[in-house]
Image (cartoon, rainbow, N blue to C red):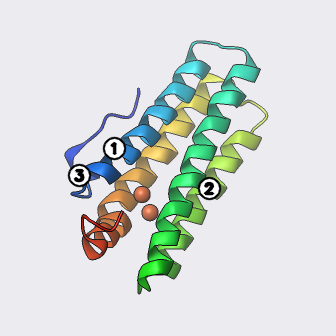
Amino acid sequence: MPIEWRPEFSVGDPGVDYEHRQLVDLVNVAAADILDNRPEADVERALGDLLRAVTAHFAHEEHQMRAAGYDQLHDHKDDHERLIDSLRDIMDDRDIAAPAAAERLTRVLEDWFTGHFSTHDARLHKVLGPHEH
Ligand SMILES: [Fe+2]
Ligand SMILES: [Fe+2]
């Protein structure tokens, strides 16, 4: 089951929501490659694309937080690192191309998105305001 965009994912800033939608799409592409029995090299490429996009998005937010002297930088960054660790665990799995890996990927990422977007990101982008990025 692909991750579907939900209203509670929105942080109230269309530019940020667009970036978050792209991350959701990349999760779905990687999961679909696994479920379609694509060669392992394709699955690894899709997961690599996802990891790169996630890392770049987080780096951008962390830069914004530092520039703004944001009070919850530490907690927010910890939650980013938690997801990077989970994603790396999934990618290190020997059975990366098995259907169970697709389920694990979507479940872990959807849970994280559900928690992070509506809390850490919603607060951050409210503080930054719509013209800061
Ligand atoms: Fe974000
Ligand atoms: Fe974030």
Looking at the rendered image, the disc whose residue lies closer to the viewer, 1 or 3, is 1
Q: Which mark is residue 84?
A: 2
Ligand 1 has an atom within 8 Å of the beta carbon of the residue at disc 3: no
Q: Position of residue 31 (x, y in %)?
A: 54, 27
- Which quadrant contains ligand 2? bottom left
Residue type at mark 3: give it. Answer: Glu
Q: Position of residue 48 (x, y in %)?
A: 67, 37
Residue at 72%, 15% (x, y): give it: 39
Residue type at mark 1: give it. Answer: Tyr
| Residue to which mark 1 is pinned | 18
Q: Which type of secondary structure does the marked residue at label 1 adopt?
A: helix
In which quadrant of the rendered image does the N terminus lie? top left
Residue at 37%, 68% (x, y): give it: 120
Query: Do the CB atoms of the residues marked 2 and 1 lie less than 8 Å apart?
Result: no
Q: Which mark is residue 8?
A: 3
Q: Earlier in the sequence, mark 2 or mark 1?
A: 1
Residue type at mark 2: give it. Answer: Ile
Residue at 69%, 29% (x, y): give it: 45
In the displayed structure, would residue 3 be above or below residue 111? above
In screen coordinates, is 43 left or right of 56? right
At label 1, counting other C-alpha atoms closer than 10 Å, the crowd grade (few under 14, some 14-19, many 20 or more) is: few
Q: Position of residue 127 (x, y in %)?
A: 28, 76
Q: Earlier in the sequence, mark 2 or mark 3?
A: 3
In screen coordinates, is 30 left or right of 130? right
Cα distance between the residues tagged 1 and 3: 14 Å
Q: Which type of secondary structure does the marked residue at label 3 adopt?
A: helix
In the displayed structure, would residue 93 be above or below residue 88? above
Residue at 55%, 49% (x, y): give it: 54
